[in-house]
Image (cartoon, rainbow, N blue to C red):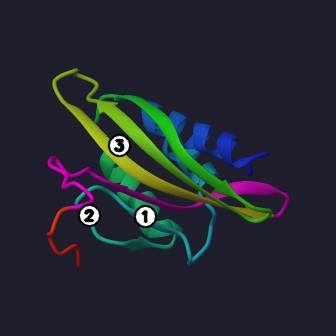
Amino acid sequence: MSYPDPTAAETAFYAAFRSLDLEQMRSVWMDSSGSSCIHPGGGLLQGIDDILASWAAIFRDSTPPRIEHRLIQASTDERLAVHTVQEDINSGSGTRRAVVLATNIYGYIDGGWRMLAHHASLPLVETQSADSQALLH
């Protein structure tokens, strides 16, 4: 399955996450060796098999979480879309809350849009001002 635009693919991605639906998650991802996923604190996963195995592990024995996402920035051309989002994730039991920043990349192939990459990370707790003397790299 593919989606008519990147926003529809993103909506389906978060619906699959909320409902812990691995088959729906599979439908969102591009079946490509070039697909990649990085979960918060995790390593690089490449290829659809490793990506779906990671989602299966996340979904296993989980209570459906409450997830809201907010688009921060989007850049789209004819074949590629990059979305930066903020994810507000509350555990299904309501005991934990996390704010996660994510970059979602979608590719246009075979007449529709699919997820090509998802990179999520926890934001810094403390930020430095732009005029700080600290070395950035």
In percent of width and height, residue 47 lies at: 50, 73
Q: Nearer the viewer, mark 3 or mark 1?
A: 1
Dot 3 or dot 2, earlier in sequence = 2
The region drawn magenta spans: 110-131
Query: Does dot 1 land on a helix, a strand or a loop?
Result: strand
Residue 109 visible (yes or no): yes
- Quadrant where the C terminus is found in the figure: bottom left
Dot 3 or dot 1, earlier in sequence = 1
In percent of width and height, residue 28 lies at: 61, 50
Left or right of 111 on screen, residue 101: left
- Tell me the residue at 64%/56% (across/down): 75
- Tell me the residue at 28%/25% (across/down): 92
The relative height of residue 50 versus residue 103 in the rendered view (above or below) is below
Residue 61 visible (yes or no): no
Amino acid on which the number 3 mark rests in the picture: Phe
From the image, tell me which residue sits under label 1: 37
From the image, tell me which residue sits under label 2: 42
From the image, tell me which residue sits under label 3: 59
Q: Nearer the viewer, residue 46 or 49?
A: 46
Left or right of 126 on screen, residue 40: right
Q: Nearer the viewer, residue 101 or 58?
A: 101
The relative height of residue 5 versus residue 44 in the rendered view (above or below) is above
Question: CA–CA distance between discs 1 and 2?
Answer: 9 Å
Local packing at callout 3 (Cα closer than 10 Å; few below 14, some 14-19, many 20+) is some
Question: CA–CA distance between discs 3 and 1?
Answer: 16 Å
In percent of width and height, residue 16 lies at: 51, 38
Local packing at callout 2 (Cα closer than 10 Å; few below 14, some 14-19, many 20+) is few
Q: Quadrant of residue 108?
A: bottom right
Amino acid on which the number 1 mark rests in the picture: Cys
